[in-house]
Amino acid sequence: MEDVLHCFHTFKDIFLLGRVRKKPKAIANALRTELVKKRKVDEETNAETWTQSKKQRKMNAWRDYISHEIYISKELDADFNFPKIHLVCHWAEQIRRYGALQQNSAKRYEHAQNTNLKDGWNASNHNLNYLPQVISFQRLILCFEIRELNLQAIA
């Protein structure tokens, strides 16, 4: 586990662009708008002197330049500053000390979801609008469970 974490931290920069938040995206969009305006000005001022092939080369160069600048802008503002990545670093030691991590196990929730969905499906009439029937069935089951807990508390 520790080897895999070390490998992840070595290569995690690959995923950085997926971590760009709203503010850096807005900055990158503003930069794109500004660079597109500069490209249009360049095109308008030199349109008479450019041949068609030179214009194509210039537009390709501008496109590459703009995409590179946007990439750099997003890359500088991206980070992995969120708790889950940090928590994973402590798991190996916690597992050695206490065994399996129950708080990260989905077994209980998967079983409950499967049971709830299957019971709801079996209680429905199996046609195309089964989802509202499953939800109302689950609501009914929860109401009965709450009623039972209230009666137990009164007794």
Image: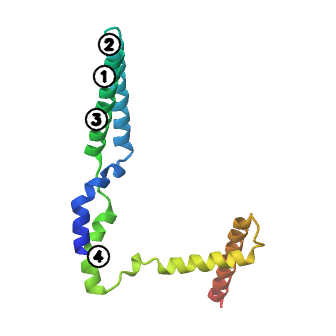
Instruction: Name the residue rendered at 50%, 81% in the picture.
Output: 108
Q: What's the distance in space between the residues labelled 3 and 4, CA to CA?
A: 38 Å
Q: What's the distance in space between the residues labelled 4 and 1, CA to CA?
A: 53 Å
Neighbor class of circle 2 (other Cα within 10 Å; few <14, some 14-19, many 20+) is few
Q: Is residue 80 left or right of residue 136?
A: left
Which amino acid type corresponds to the residue marked 4 in the rendered image?
Trp
Q: What's the distance in space between the residues labelled 1 and 3, CA to CA?
A: 16 Å
Q: Earlier in the sequence, mark 3 or mark 4?
A: 3
Say above or below: 45 vs 3. Answer: above
Query: What secondary structure is marked by label 4?
Result: helix
Query: What secondary structure is marked by label 3?
Result: helix
Residue 78 horizontal/vertical position (percent): 29, 48
Q: Are marks 2 and 1 in contact (CB under 8 Å)?
A: yes
Mark 3 highlights which residue?
Answer: 69
Q: Quadrant of the C terminus?
A: bottom right
Which amino acid type corresponds to the residue marked 1 in the rendered image?
Lys
Say above or below: 1 vs 76. Answer: below
Mark 1 highlights which residue?
Answer: 58
Q: What's the distance in space between the residues labelled 2 and 1, CA to CA?
A: 9 Å
Q: Earlier in the sequence, mark 4 or mark 1?
A: 1
Q: Can you tell which of label 4 and label 2 is closer to the viewer?
A: 2
Mark 4 highlights which residue?
Answer: 91
Q: Can you tell which of label 4 and label 1 is closer to the viewer?
A: 1
